[in-house]
Amino acid sequence: MYPFEIGPIRPVDEADSLLIRTTRNCPWNKCEFCVNYQHENFSIRSVEEIKNDIEKTANYYSNNRFERCFLQDGDSLIMRTADLLDILTYLKTFFPDLKTISSYGRAWSMSRKSPAELNEICEAGLNLLYCGMESGADEVLEMVNKGVSSKEIISAGIHAKEAGMRLSEFVISGLGGRELWQVHAKETAKALNAINADKIRVLTIGVKPGSGLEQKIADGSYTLQTEENIIEEQKMMVHHLNGITSHYAHHHAVDLLLEVRGQLPKDKDYLLSIFDRFLDLSDNYKRNFILGRRLGFYNRLDDLHERNNYNTVEKQFQKFGINSNFELENLYHSLRSQIV
């Protein structure tokens, strides 16, 4: 048990970072795909509380020299600028080695700050924002109740970059379902082209129990894509990424092809070749790789050459008693949805 507050989530890139909780939960908390803060009220912690936690954290990690810090939970930019600046100054006093301080940032909160405010916040040390774009297609954003339009997402991203902040945009592959997958791929690429974020981080949809999307599946208004179709979608999106210098990566355990990572524009053909390599597999190898990846036997396509693992995965099909492609896709999705 820590002597200070720790929030429930942080980005994958911040696995080894110092965590300081400035807000509790999410100020929007209405997205149909999310259950992270379900039934929890949002609140901004007082400056006194946060400073007290900074002191306790410094004492607890007295022998650690952190270079990165992530401010939890859902959106630190919603704080009053003066309070946030006070916290950042205090944080760097106790952790002088910090080079990167980051936070989630909603488009709405980013847009509320003036250029001068954002620049001052960046200069004070909060120099990286993680932004949940999820999709650049208005039809998808409306369907999942994101609360912003693609135009607002683009404007907010450009606004933050002009202030000197680095930007990491999250995209959820498969979010549009079978109904909207092509517009999701193309319009998301269009939004990413307009922003030119420093990083593009892609996660694959896993519909969580109790989420709004689960209800949409039940009432027939949302249909999950197959694993193969999700890769086709990802290929289409990368194909339409042009004129940007972002680092693109699948880096979360929920992603099927973890080796898809590279620097645009030079690695674009390489990224596309990985999608093609998967899509060109025979049906049996494709099926084996998907289940093997979802069960943790594989990390890369080359792992298919490990015959012992291949045979072990084949035995899993018998264990699960799969009799149809429909049952198989439901199993894949069930395994995806369990990943945190």
Image (tube, helix red, strand yellow):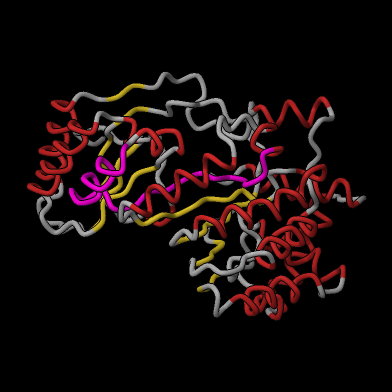
Report which quarter residue 190 is drawn in: bottom right
Between residue 190 and residue 202, name the one nearer to us: 190
Q: Residue furthest front?
A: 115
Left or right of 128 in this view: 99: left
Report which quarter residue 143 is drawn in: top right
**Segment colored magenta:** 114-138
Residue 131 falls inside the magenta stretch: yes
Q: Position of residue 191 (x, y in %)?
A: 59, 52
Q: Residue furthest right?
A: 324
Q: Position of residue 231 (x, y in %)?
A: 73, 61
Q: Residue at x 50, y 55 (%)?
A: 195
Left or right of 32 in this view: 26: left
For the N terminus, give its image quadrant. top left
Residue 119 falls inside the magenta stretch: yes
Above/below status of 263 relative to 314: below
Report which quarter residue 164 is drawn in: bottom left
Q: Position of residue 158 (x, y in %)?
A: 44, 51
- For the image, the number of numbered tags is 0
Left or right of 188 in this view: 80: left
Between residue 121 and residue 287, name the one nearer to us: 121
Q: Residue at x 76, y 49 (%)?
A: 181
Between residue 315 and residue 161, name the one nearer to us: 161
Q: Position of residue 294 (x, y in %)?
A: 67, 56
Q: Residue at x 25, y 40 (%)?
A: 117
Q: Residue at x 69, y 68 (%)?
A: 239
Above/below status of 118 relative to 43: below
Above/below status of 46 relative to 272: above
